[in-house]
Image (cartoon, rainbow, N blue to C red):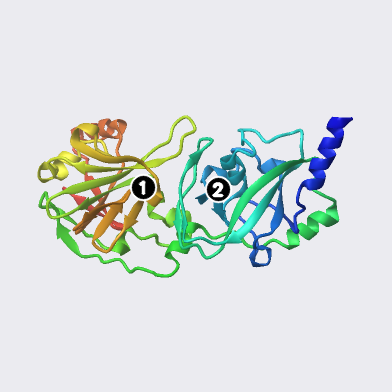
Amino acid sequence: EEEEEEEDEEDEEKEAPVETFLYRPGVPLPNLAPYVHKLIEVRIAAEYLSMDNKFFQKRHIWGNDLYTSDSDLVCVLHHTGLYKVSPAAPKDIEGLGIFLRVSKGRNSYTSTTRQGLRTRRWNNYEGHSIKAERCEELMTLGSKEEIDAMMRKMPSSSAKSKKSRHHQMRRFIPDVTLMFNLSNEPCMKYTLGLVADKGLEHDLWTSFRLKKDVIYLETDQQRFELSLERGHDGSYDSYRWARVLNPYQMNNSVMSQQVIPLSPKLVDVVFDRLDWEDIEWGPNSIRVKGQLFPGIVRAQFLSIKSEEDLASNHQLNLNGEQKDSFVLGESKLILGV
């Protein structure tokens, strides 16, 4: 009886939310200005509480303890440790209620890893901050009328990504000037337009393009390679920034006989396991994990090539049918007969 009385007292001490919303994947919370310094509740249906949630898979979360208000709340639950997301959705509850303290947006949101989930960093966010204070299991999300009311409070459109918000202020027109690289062979002049995202859809982003291509960037004396590192056993995709050894000798003929990205014996790995936000593009420089690489003047995209691709190409060579293809900007330059 004493334990029951203590539990009742604890329930009475819990602060009640001033407003309740219903979670929808990819849909941001509404304008939270009326709720600054106040507590709100967001109810999340059990079907979204699994690793199949694509916004969990994409790590749609920015910050540490204080998160941007457009961060995915399933990610927030997992990162804070309030709820551990598993491969399968829970079947013994109808959902969870996450209680969030709202505050003003911050100049900087840091990245950190907790519970195996790495958040992203962001600067000068124009929205609000949220801090998860507790979560509660729900045997019901509410009556039909309550659910309809919660849904009406949410925006009707999906959230624009951080990437699109980053680029929506400026549009770049690619510079298609041809130059000669350190191997004295044609390549593209480096411009922001060459590496900028080309639209709001993810398949138009440079980070997505690196799923099939590798980008090589040159100064007057060095060549660098930026490539995707595929995640394995549940880990996330990351990126590798490497310095190509002997770039003057790495001409088209030599490159056509190598796997792409280049093997470790042909590069000096400067950084690996990079997040995309660790890479900042400048008009004539690139900053990687805080280290500046100035004087970038040339760029070239090459298609990813595996050992199996090399073997296949070798067979084509025997038949006299091979042509080496190098991606230049948005087009391909065919070298050979």
Image position of 216 with respect to 316: above or below: below
Disc 1 marks which residue?
A: 210
Relative to 142, 205 lies left or right: left
Which residue sits at x=33%, y=48%? Answer: 289
* Image x and y of residue 84, in percent: 62, 35
Relative to 133, 202 lies left or right: left
Which residue sits at x=51%, y=38%? Answer: 114
Picture disc at residue 65: 2
Choose between 2 and 56: the one closer to the eye: 2
* Image x and y of residue 123, in percent: 44, 59
Residue 156 visible here:
no
Relative to 150, 334 lies left or right: left
* Image x and y of residue 250, in percent: 14, 42
Image position of 108 with respect to 55: above or below: below
Q: Secondary structure at mark 2?
A: loop
Relative to 126, 321 lies left or right: left
Q: State how far apart marks 2 and 1 are (Cα).
A: 31 Å
Residue 154 visible here:
yes
Label 2: how many Cα within 10 Å (few below 14, some 14–19, many 20+): some
Earlier in the chain: of badge 2 and badge 1, it is: 2
Which residue sits at x=44%, y=62%? Answer: 166
Choose between 311 and 140: the one closer to the eye: 140
* Image x and y of residue 213, in percent: 32, 46
Check if mark 2's residue and mark 1's residue have beta carbons within 8 Å. Answer: no
Between disc 2 and disc 1, the foreground one is 2
